[in-house]
Amino acid sequence: MATALEAVQALQQRFGSAVGAPATFADRLTGRDEVTVTVAREQLAAVCRSLKEAGFDFLVDICGVDNHDSDPRFAVHYLLYSFKNRCLLRLRVGVPEEDATVASVTSVWKGADWHERECYDMLGIRFTGHPDLRRILMWEGYPFHPLRKEFPLEGQPSNVPDVAFTEAAPLQGGPFVTVHGPHVADREPAVRENALPEDIRSVEPNKP
Amino acid sequence: MPDSTATVGYGGRLEDEAIVTRLDAAVDWARKNSLWPMPMGLACCAIELMATAASRFDISRFGAEVMRFSPRQADLMIVAGTVTYKMALAVKRIWEQMPDPKWCIAMGACASTGGMYRSYATLQGIDKLLPVDVYIAGCPPRPEALLDALLKIQEKISREPGLKRLKKTPAEKAP
């Protein structure tokens, strides 16, 4: 953690108020030792270049987050690792819905390419300067961004002629769908179909 | 009785060495005992598909061991696994590249109905895109179930007027 905090202090000296105060989390049991820092969106690319020079040579992951009903709505998290100093650092960038763009960091870490494509595909956040910003999980031309909170799990019908179509998936019925019920025998299809004896099924849950 | 040591050829009389049948039946017989599958392995069902082809279950007992990874040489597509919408485009395209006549097995719950993947990303059954001949239940099905499906396809082929339908018309192919 110490080296990550030093890196954050160096950033604060160089970028001033564009770099927020670091939040730390350490847990001896799980071995987690993490530093998170919020970075202004405009300064992200410069901060990333500076961090790479400071030894953070591996971009572990980029993930988008939809914090629905909060301002700014989206956030993009960058998880960095330094093989030399053996420490993790997480950057957090807020992204407003009306201008959902972030600078691409593919020029800093090449591995950012597919992470940014996934984030664009799932949440619709555009990465400016990305060399090839296409969808990666859904088909090209799909009109929605499925990880946005207002998007239903079962999907929405769409039809792009001569390309593809989608239909909403049924969420009720069928052997794999868990139904509402207090006892596992009522909820889980496997147990339901194996026909437990009546005295076991009639036991109330959470009673000794 | 013909002499078993005699030279094989056109030496004997007609009734000893010829089989009388309908041409339809002969065409069907040739087709059904030499199905060349296109193994469309997309998820864990593909593991069972491979087990079916291996020595213990040995799909070659039924003449379908020639797995072709080129659709142009295959006439039976085995859709084994979860079909995502993105992969569905490729499955459809490969199906269209297979020459007629061709058949399709939807192997397992996912390929048949979407299975437990009730979500925006998964096609809810490959029969929304292709005409499926046999569905196999199971998650994943045992190799025996796949062999059973193969025998059902063979039964189906042997009932077809093979000669008349050397080429299926597009209207007949519609699911």
Image (cartoon, helix red, strand yellow):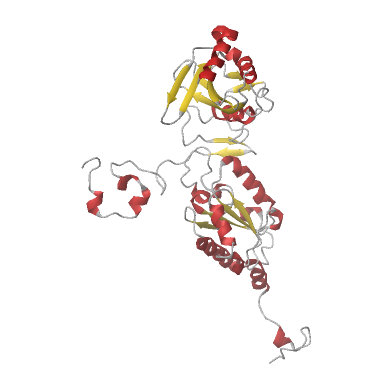
Which residue appears farthest toward the left when viewing the image?
A208
Camera-side residue of A125 and A156: A125
Total numbered labels placed on residues in the image: 0
Residue A118, given in percent of the width and then of the height, sits at 58, 30
Where A104 sits versus B41, above or below?
A: above
Tell me: B118 left or right of B3: left
Identity of the residue drawn at 55% across and 30% down: A122
Where B135 sits versus B24, above or below?
A: above
Where B50 sits versus B13, above or below?
A: above
Residue B105, given in percent of the width and then of the height, sits at 56, 56
Camera-side residue of A89 and A176: A89
Residue A40, given in percent of the width and then of the height, sits at 56, 13
Identity of the residue drawn at 78% across and 86% down: B7
Viewer can see residue A103: no
Tell me: B60 left or right of A191: right
Viewer can see residue B33: yes
Identity of the residue drawn at 23% across and 48% down: A202
Image quarter for residue A103? top right
Tell me: B11 left or right of A116: right
Camera-side residue of A51 and B102: A51
Quadrant including the C terminus of chain A: top left
Residue A20, given in percent of the width and then of the height, sits at 51, 12
Tell me: A89 left or right of A208: right
Image quarter for residue A104? top right
